Every structure is written in structure tokens, then in C-alpha cells.
Image: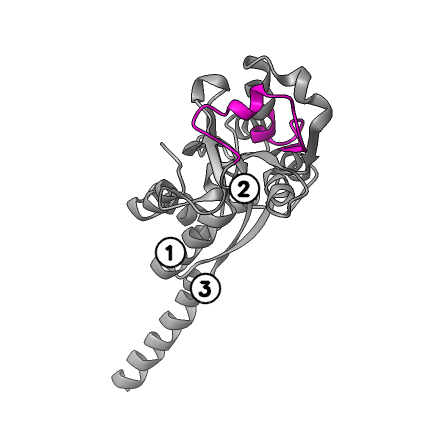
Amino acid sequence: MPRIIAATLLAMLAIFSLPARAASVQVAVAANMTAPMQKIAAGFAAATGHRTVVSLGSTGKFYAQIRNGAPFEVLLAADDETPARLEREGFGVRGSRFTYATGRLALWSADAGALDAQADVLRQPPTGKMAIADPRVAPYGAAALQVLTKMGVLTDWQSHLVQGENIGQAYQFVASGNARLGFVALSQVTTEGRIARGSAWLVPQDLHTPLKQDALLLPRGESNPAARALLDYLRSDAARAVLRGYGYGF
């Protein structure tokens, strides 16, 4: 009889532990995080058993969706203002917000000879199109406009700008040849510290507002252990090593 009871207890413990091991978390992720998030999600699953269900898009659109009841449990934004605003307005769990990375902006071309270390092409008469993310909803797009304004070349390039819905679409415009140049996230064009294709100018950070990217636990994820575990994992050495490899700072 004791053996039967012990076996029954072990079976029950196994059953009750399954949800914790197999839990999933719905995450709204800024498009600049597309590549690193794939690796982070894989590492998170290996370390915890939890699964991430990732939706990629612009931070501004996620803001509207979260306010309208979208079933996200965690937000990984491309700025720090949007998560702070959601927290103030009651759409984020107070005290859960933190900066998980600081992004870098790059001007990129698929042409290996298009850009030099000073981005002299910006001061020359414009040729071809320049892609940026929609500055109304994408922090990297807003940063791109700040750069062009501070350099005094926005007026020259204004009629040559094409806007992507998010930084992912801006990248695709350049990668496909529909735009000669584009302001993108450094993480989209670099791997382990090297430009993977074409040429790029790493934008000096004093030309735009710092791209501090904050994470926020949303009310739907407050009781989900996988959501809290993901936020903890983003602070880990393993996650930071991935982010560092894509050009992010902290």
C-alpha cells in the first residue's frame, strides 16, 4: 500500500508540474528585435521550458492594441516612453518596467560601396529613395528624422523618403532594392559585431534621443509564471550576450 500511495503521489506531482513547464507567454516585440528575439526565445525555452508566442510590430501600434484589449502579456518596446505611459494609464503592472537594452541606429545600403564612415552621401544631392520607419509609431523612425534634422539635410531628402510601417519594413525596402538607403536598427544588419551585407554608417548617438528600450509586464501576464520568467531571463547574462552580439548596449 505505501508503494501504491507513493506512486500515486509522484504521478500527481508530475501532472501538476506540467503547466509550469509547458506554459506559454504572449509577447509584443518591437520589430528591431526580430533576429535577437529568435535566439532569446530559444534560450529561454531551453532554460525554463516555457514557450514564447511572439508578435512583431511597431511600438506605437502595440500601444493602441494593448489599450484596446489585445491579449499580450509582455511588451518589449523600442522606447522607454510607451511602456511608461501604459504603466501610468493602468495598462501595465506597476514596478515591472525596466530597460532591457539600448538600441543603435544605422544608415544602411545593400550596396557595399554606398556609405563611408562620415555618411558623406547625406550631404550630396539625393539620388534614389531613403527608407525610414513611420516616425509617428516607430521610435527608430522618429530618431531618423532627428538625425536628418540635426545634420541640416532633412529638406533635401524629404521628397525622397519612403516610410515603412515599422523598422522591419524599412529594412525590407532597402534589402529588396526599392530604396537605395535606409535608417534601420543596427541589429538588423549586423551579426557578432560585423555588417552582414552591404555598407552601413553607425549613427552617432548624440544626433538623436537615446533608444532606450523598456520591457513591461502587462495585466494579462501578471499571474502567468512564464511572463515573469521571461522578464527575469532578459536580465540574464545569456540574454545580454545575445543582445550584445546584435549591437545593443545596456
- Answer left or right for 15 relative to 172: left
Helix, strand or loop at mark 2: loop
Q: Name the residue under label 1.
A: 43
- Answer left or right for 3 relative to 197: left
Q: How far apart are marks 1 and 3 (CA)?
A: 15 Å
Q: Which mark is residue 111?
A: 2
* Eye-nearest disc, 1 or 3: 1
Residue 182's x, y, as percent?
Answer: 59, 34
* Eye-nearest disc, 2 or 1: 2
Please report the residue visible at 49 percent of the width from the left and 48 percent of the height from the top: 223
Looking at the rendered structure, the kind of residue marked 2 is Asp
Helix, strand or loop at mark 3: helix
Helix, strand or loop at mark 1: helix
Residue 9's x, y, as percent?
Answer: 34, 75
Residue 70 lies, with reference to residue 148, above or below; the image says: below
Please report the residue visible at 54 percent of the width from the left and 30 percent of the height from the top: 83
Q: Which of marks 1 and 3 is nearer the N terminus?
A: 3
> Which quadrant, please, contains the N terminus?
bottom left
Judge whether residue 137 is colored magenta.
Answer: yes
189 and 71: which is toward the camera? 189
Q: In this figure, what is the number of numbered marks?
A: 3
- The residue range painted magenta reads 114-143
